[in-house]
Image (tube, grey):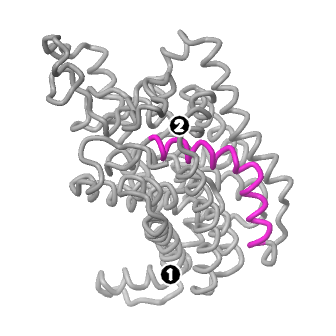
């Protein structure tokens, strides 16, 4: 998703108390600095008032001591820490869905309306942090990397959705679900993961914004082409739903930000936690719908009562659950790997490679869940996007923390545009 609420106050410990500032070494190029839509987003460009190499050196000004933490800072740190635990929430919710599916029945029985409403609220929260003029300004500064990233998003993942489903011989419902997942725009947490991974955060933000807006046409069109041979696909219906639950709330949120800035400023700190909890609830509810069917596939293999734990685990992963988990894992792995390699071949530097890799590999699985539940008769179509919410975030977080301790060789102190 993502000039998303996930970003607006997410502050990993090592990057705390920083401000958003993107500068270019070429003085003739414009400077993109401190846009309101990024006002709470710390970036990889660390600008400390007392740090060496800051603008104070040689300027005749004495260093200024950093401000003492306030109660507001403490509150924002608590909220951002809670929001950063998204992978933990979806994993815990997935486990709960396995052992007690009825825990989500209150939400499931109101679907798909409850699914659409929750996603619409998530996207509204995203719109509250987005100013379209800022997105356009950044796009005009660095069109090459942004266009490449968007093209990669809508070619690599849809293609591998089809390739993986054919390679594993998935049944039609799973195939359509995997292709639909691959055709979705960038994922909710991709910007946070890019931040952790020391990637190009502004590039990730604008890629997610552009692919999300483009999903109105591209997601239904690609799904129709790739999955239309398996089941009937209502491309117009998919497009209208995407417009209703994605684009309209984003534009409404952006409008509210410009017209009611004081009210929006009060709400914004709570938006990240709301977004991750709503996304977790959405994914785990759909997963719980299919648990009974999945469990039946596990029991199909008759096991003696004294069977070992390893044998029982093998029986689980040899059924439908294991197949769909493998398919989703392979799809996201392909997105991360091919996204990085393609960016490297084109010649982008390490921060941009990481941003493109993460952005391509992480999908808006919530949108996939809503579209699958609203437009396909088989509930199993929604299973790949629901499983993706858990698998994708675990994979993305792992990659992010690995790269966090691997400094980009091309960027020592700042992330600069390569266009």
Magenta residue span:
202-227
Q: Quadrant of residue 20?
A: top left
| Residue depicted at 60% across the width and 30% down the height | 127
Q: Say left or right for 283 vs 170.
A: left
Q: Is residue 220 visible?
A: yes
Residue 264 location (% of width, % of height): 54, 17
Q: Is residue 366 one of those drawn in magenta?
A: no
Pointers 1 and 2 in contact (C-beta within 8 Å): no
Q: Which residue is mark 2?
A: 3
Kind of element beneath mark 1:
helix
Circle nearer the N terminus (1, 2): 2
Judge whether 223 appears above or below 80 on screen. Answer: below
The residues bearing labels 1 and 2 have C-alpha atoms spaced at a distance of 44 Å
Judge whether 77 appears above or below 299 on screen. Answer: above
Q: Quadrant of residue 46?
A: top left
Q: Nearer the viewer, residue 13 or 339?
A: 339
| Residue depicted at 67% across the width and 41% down the height | 114
How many marks the image carries: the answer is 2
Q: Say left or right for 120 vs 208.
A: right
């Amino acid at each position: 998703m993502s000039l998303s609420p996930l970003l607006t106050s997410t502050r990993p410990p090592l990057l705390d108390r920083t401000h958003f500032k993107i500068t270019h070494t070429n003085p003739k190029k414009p400077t993109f600095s401190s846009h309101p839509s990024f006002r709470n987003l710390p970036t990889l460009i660390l600008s400390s008032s007392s740090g060496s190499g800051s603008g104070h050196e040689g300027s005749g000004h004495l260093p200024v001591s950093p401000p003492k933490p306030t109660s507001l800072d403490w509150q924002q740190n608590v909220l951002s820490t809670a929001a950063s635990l998204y992978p933990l929430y979806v994993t815990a919710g997935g486990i709960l869905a396995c052992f007690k599916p009825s825990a989500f029945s209150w939400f499931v029985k109101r679907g798909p309306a409850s699914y659409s409403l929750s996603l619409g609220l998530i996207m509204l929260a995203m719109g509250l942090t987005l100013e379209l003029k800022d997105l356009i300004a950044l796009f005009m500064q660095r069109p090459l990397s942004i266009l490449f990233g968007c093209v990669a998003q809508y070619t690599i993942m849809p293609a591998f959705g089809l390739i993986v489903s054919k390679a594993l011989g998935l049944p039609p419902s799973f195939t359509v679900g995997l292709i639909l997942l691959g055709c979705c725009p960038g994922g909710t947490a991709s910007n946070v993961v890019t931040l952790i991974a020391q990637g190009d955060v502004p590039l990730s933000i604008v890629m997610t914004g552009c692919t999300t807006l483009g999903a109105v046409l591209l997601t239904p069109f690609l799904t129709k082409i790739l999955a239309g041979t398996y089941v009937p696909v209502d491309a117009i219906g998919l497009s209208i739903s995407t417009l209703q639950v994605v684009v309209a709330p984003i534009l409404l949120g952006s409008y509210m930000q410009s017209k009611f800035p004081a009210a929006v400023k009060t709400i914004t700190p709570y938006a990240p936690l709301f977004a991750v909890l709503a996304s977790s609830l959405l994914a785990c509810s759909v997963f719980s719908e299919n648990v009974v069917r999945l469990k039946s596939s596990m029991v199909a293999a008759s096991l003696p009562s004294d069977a070992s734990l390893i044998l029982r685990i093998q029986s689980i992963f040899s059924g439908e659950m294991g197949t769909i988990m493998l398919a989703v894992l392979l799809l996201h792995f392909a997105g991360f790997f091919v996204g990085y390699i393609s960016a490297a071949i084109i010649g982008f530097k390490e921060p941009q490679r990481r941003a493109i890799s993460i952005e391509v590999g992480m999908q808006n699985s919530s949108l996939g869940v809503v579209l699958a539940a609203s437009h396909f008769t088989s509930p199993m179509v929604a299973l790949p996007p629901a499983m993706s919410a858990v698998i994708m975030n675990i994979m993305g977080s792992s990659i992010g923390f690995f790269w966090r301790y691997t400094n980009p060789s091309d960027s020592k102190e700042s992330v600069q545009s390569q266009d």
